[in-house]
Image: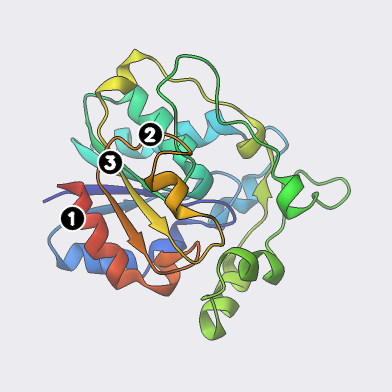
């Protein structure tokens, strides 16, 4: 039995794992989906100061106050930054980190992972500090999101606090003990082969390629669950 801690990416909350959670539980696993401060049902807590340290504390506190022993972290999209930092601090308990179409860390002791999301997704509305989700964004990197799934994402997606992207994170030597695995999505428009061949960074564990856009937990949860269970071993 594996304890999965599921950390969603930009615009999402724990709701994004609603199709994944019961499938993992039916297979005998425990599941702890996270909503990061400022998104999902915690959107009312969004401020200009919500950044990486807030997100990391969200996950650390979920682990602590649910008294979770050893666990597998799954980080989607930008939350690859978050799960890397959590695994670094809880390296004794983190059995493995699975990066789901996610930002991948380098094993260096200097700040990393800061990027400007406005270049790709546009600036926040005037006076705001978060980028709203639009159909244009969904169709650009998740063209398999259609019909009721598209409506669901537009109904439940919440603005993404910019500071979550622009904040860097720093790993210690402890991260060198962490095991990694990866799920790549082949319909995002990004060249997955560059990751697999090592052109965009060395892979340090097994990987799966799933034929979906950026949100397989929405469009193909059954196959994703099979991959997560296999990679968690």
Mark-to-mark CA distance, 1 and 2: 21 Å
Q: Label 2: how many residues lie within 10 Å, few (<14), some (14-19) or many (20+)?
A: some
Q: Is residue 119 visible?
A: yes
* 224 sits left or right of 162 in the view: left
Kindly identify which residue carries mark 1.
230
Q: Nearer the viewer, mark 1 or mark 3?
A: 1
Looking at the image, which residue sits at the far bottom?
Answer: 147
Residue 46 screen position, x and y as percent: 66, 44
Q: Label 1: how many residues lie within 10 Å, few (<14), some (14-19) or many (20+)?
A: few
Kindly identify which residue carries mark 2.
202
Residue 154 screen position, x and y as percent: 63, 71
* Residue at x-position 30% and y-position 26%: 90
- Does 177 sit above or below residue 45? above
| Label 1 or label 2, whichever comes before in sequence order | 2
Mark-to-mark CA distance, 2 and 3: 34 Å
Residue 151 found in image quarter = bottom right
* 51 sits left or right of 87 in the view: right
Residue 58 screen position, x and y as percent: 46, 37
Q: Nearer the viewer, mark 2 or mark 3?
A: 2
Numbered tag placed on residue 66 in the rendering: 3
Mark-to-mark CA distance, 1 and 3: 25 Å
- Give the secondary structure at mark 1: helix
| Label 2 or label 3, whichever comes before in sequence order | 3
Query: For this rendering, which residue is in front, 209 or 123?
Result: 209
């Amino acid at each position: 039995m594996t304890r999965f801690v599921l950390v969603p990416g930009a615009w999402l909350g724990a709701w994004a794992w609603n199709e994944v959670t019961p499938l993992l539980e039916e297979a005998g696993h425990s599941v702890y989906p996270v909503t990061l401060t400022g998104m999902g049902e915690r959107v009312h807590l969004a401020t200009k100061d919500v950044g990486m340290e807030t997100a990391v504390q969200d996950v650390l506190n979920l682990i602590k106050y649910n008294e979770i022993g050893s666990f597998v972290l799954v980080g989607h999209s930008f939350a690859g930054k978050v799960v890397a930092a959590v695994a670094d601090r809880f390296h004794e308990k983190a059995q493995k980190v699975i990066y789901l179409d996610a930002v991948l860390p380098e094993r260096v002791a200097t700040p990393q992972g800061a990027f400007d999301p406005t270049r790709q997704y546009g600036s926040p509305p005037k006076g705001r500090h978060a980028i709203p989700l639009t159909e244009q964004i969904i169709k650009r990197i998740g063209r398999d999101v259609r019909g009721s799934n598209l409506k669901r994402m537009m109904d439940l997606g919440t603005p993404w606090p910019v500071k979550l992207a622009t904040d860097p994170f720093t790993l210690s030597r402890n991260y060198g003990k962490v095991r990694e695995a990866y799920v790549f999505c082949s319909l995002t428009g990004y060249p997955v082969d560059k990751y697999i061949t090592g052109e965009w960074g060395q892979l340090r564990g097994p990987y799966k390629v799933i034929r979906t856009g950026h949100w397989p937990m929405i469009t193909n949860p059954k196959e994703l669950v099979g991959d997560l269970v296999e990679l968690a071993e």
